[in-house]
Amino acid sequence: MIIIGERINGMFKDIKQAIQERDPKPVQEWAKRQEEGGARVLDINVGPAVSDKVSAMKWLVEVTQEVSDLPLCLDSTDFVAIEEGLKLCKKPAIINSTSAERSKVEIAFPMAVKYGAGLIGLTMDSKGIPKDSDSRLAFAMELVAAADEFGLPMEDLYIDPLILPCNVAQDHAPEVLKTLQQIKMLANPAPKTVLGLSNVSNGCQNRPLINRVYMAMAMACGLDAAIADANDEDLIEVAATAEILLNQKIYCDSYVKLFIEG
């Protein structure tokens, strides 16, 4: 299970201010904290902090890599900003993300191949997120076909079936679980799967509990990675324990410690 730390994001007040003031301290503190918590990848998202997303992305990549050797997941709707960030990455990164719209596929997949990056593909198009698993799976099939078309190794494709908040779209939660199971049958080797985990609890009470329970359920259905709170110790323990109970890792008494240490 790959935990992608979600906290270096301009949607958070402290990171937004850090980007605007070019203050590396909050960014670097969160980079180190997330790595110590168990993150194996760091999501880097400029958010709405500044109008010049290209320079902000480049700055975030540079200051993050000053204190962490973890791979980065470059998160933006601006492909120019993503590409400029990719040029600075010291390790193969992950592009976050593209929908199944053809115009975006034709930009994102060649870019991922060019830079040896992973790519998160979203099971949606310009019309939005579908409700049922069959429609999500149809988009997943298009993304798998695009990987074959553009030469992206299947193990570098991460398909995100897009979980929505359970307080407004409760019926989507089981549909996403069904989709996760079916994605693993689309190719051999199968593409990886990922969720923006915190979305499931957005606007809810008991957010950490909802995130932890849904992650365990999703792992049982084939989830490989989650963009999540790497500093929720209970969440990390659930991920480590689920790996043991799903027979993905060999049991030892220090399995949680080993998960955190990577």
Image (cartoon, grey):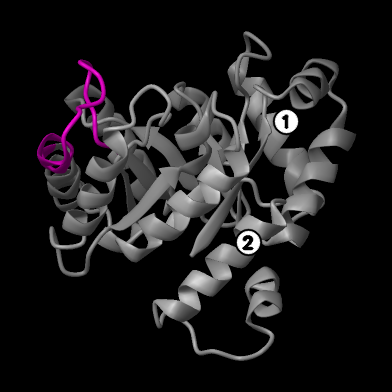
| SS for callout 2 | helix
Q: Is residue 202 magenta?
A: no
Depth check: give the residue in front, 10 or 115: 10
Horizontal side, residue 69 vs residue 100: left or right:
right
Quadrant where the C terminus sits is bottom right
Which of label 1 and label 2 is nearer to you? 2
Q: Is residue 129 magenta?
A: yes
Name the kind of residue labelled 2 in the image: Ile
Q: Say the numbered circle drawn on residue 232.
A: none
Q: Which portion, as a residue range, is magenta? A: 122-138
Sequence-earlier tag: 1 or 2: 1
Specify few, some or many for label 1: CA neighbours under 10 Å numbering under 14, 14-19, or 20 or more: some
Q: Say the numbered circle drawn on residue 236.
A: 2
- Residue 221, percent from left and from top: 30, 61
Mark 1 highlights which residue?
59
The quadrant holding residue 84 is top right
Horizontal side, residue 139 vs residue 231: left or right:
left
| SS for callout 1 | helix
